[in-house]
Each structure stands twice: as structure tokens, then as C-alpha cells.
Amino acid sequence: MPPPRRRRRPRLFTKDIETLLYALGDGPVSLDSTVNCLEDCLVEYLTDMLHEAQQFARSQGRSRIKQDDLPFALRNDPMKLGRLHDIKELINKIQRARNMLEDSAMATKEYLEDDEEEDGEKKPRKGKKRGRKKKNQPVIEQNDSNESE
């Protein structure tokens, strides 16, 4: 009986690992065996961490992992847990800065539109108007003179 064939894993992180090795002082081209070994270690670590997060999610009655399950999986490694918190804070800062920039851009746009309206120059609208169409109402003619006289 022939030995079972090992399923070949797709190499998802090869380019990233080569770039990381070069940044850490390796040559411009790393050995394939080194990159493959590091990728196997990385994939195994991520798999174990996500399995632990999935077990925590199941204990909470959920079938899917949430972002809040990762700190539980990293609870025994204070350095990685601290780095995770730092990354979350940076993401929140970036999101707040984007929101402030968008709010500022909208305020500037509204301010400029108000200036144009004050000058009497209205910008023609592009596209269709939104909302319901008004029904055709009959035009009622009114006489300025009083008919009772």
C-alpha cells in the first residue's frame, strides 16, 4: 500500500515572508525551504489561534468568530495582547480622523453652496430629482376683482 499523499497547501504568504526576511537583513532572494518553513509555522499558529477563538465563540453560544474573541485567544501572551490593543486604538484613531475629514469636507461644501445661493447664482442640478412626483392639479383662475360688486 503506497503512503498517503500529503495535500499541498496553497502558499498564501510567500511574497510577504520574503519581503519581511529581506527587511530583517536576509538577501534579496530567500531560500525556498526557509520561506516554506516560516509559512508552515505561520499557518499553524494562525490556525491554532483561530481554533481557540472559535471554541470561545461556541462557549458564548455563537457559531461565528467576532473581533472580540481574539483577545481571549491571546490572553496568555501579554505582548501580543498589548499589540492587538495598540492596533485597535490606531484603527479607531484613523476612523475618527476620516470622519472628521468627511464632516469638514461636507461643511465646506455646504458653506460654498450657501455662498453661491446668496450671490443669486444657483447651480443647475444634475440627474433626477428625488421624491414623489406631484400629481397634475387643475389650475384655478382667480379674478382680482370682487364679483359681488
Image (tube, helix red, strand yellow):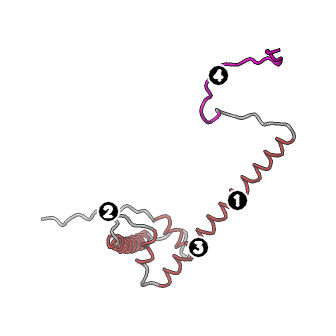
Alpha-carbon distance for marks 1 and 4?
Answer: 45 Å
- Please tell me whether residue 100 belongs to the stretch shown in magenta: no
Amino acid type, mark 1: Leu
Q: Quadrant of the N terminus?
A: bottom left
Q: Earlier in the sequence, mark 1 or mark 4?
A: 1
Mark 1 and mark 3 lie on one chain; the one further toward the N terminus is 3
Mark 2 to mark 4 CA distance (whole Å) = 73 Å
**Numbered circle sitting on residue 89:** 3
Circle 3 — which element?
Answer: helix
- Secondary structure mostly seen in magenta is loop
Read off the residue under disc 4.
137
Q: Is residue 25 left or right of residue 34?
A: right
Residue on which the image places disc 2 = 8
Query: Range of the magenta residues?
Result: 129-149
Q: How dense is the environment of label 1, judged by Cα within 10 Å: few (below 14), some, or many (20 and up)?
A: few
Alpha carbon distance from label 3 to label 4 = 58 Å
Mark pair 2, 3: CA separation: 38 Å
Packing grade of label 4 (10 A; few <14, some 14-19, many >=20) is few
Considering every residue shown, the one lying at the far right of the view is 119
Q: Horizontal and vertical percent for residue 127?
A: 66, 33
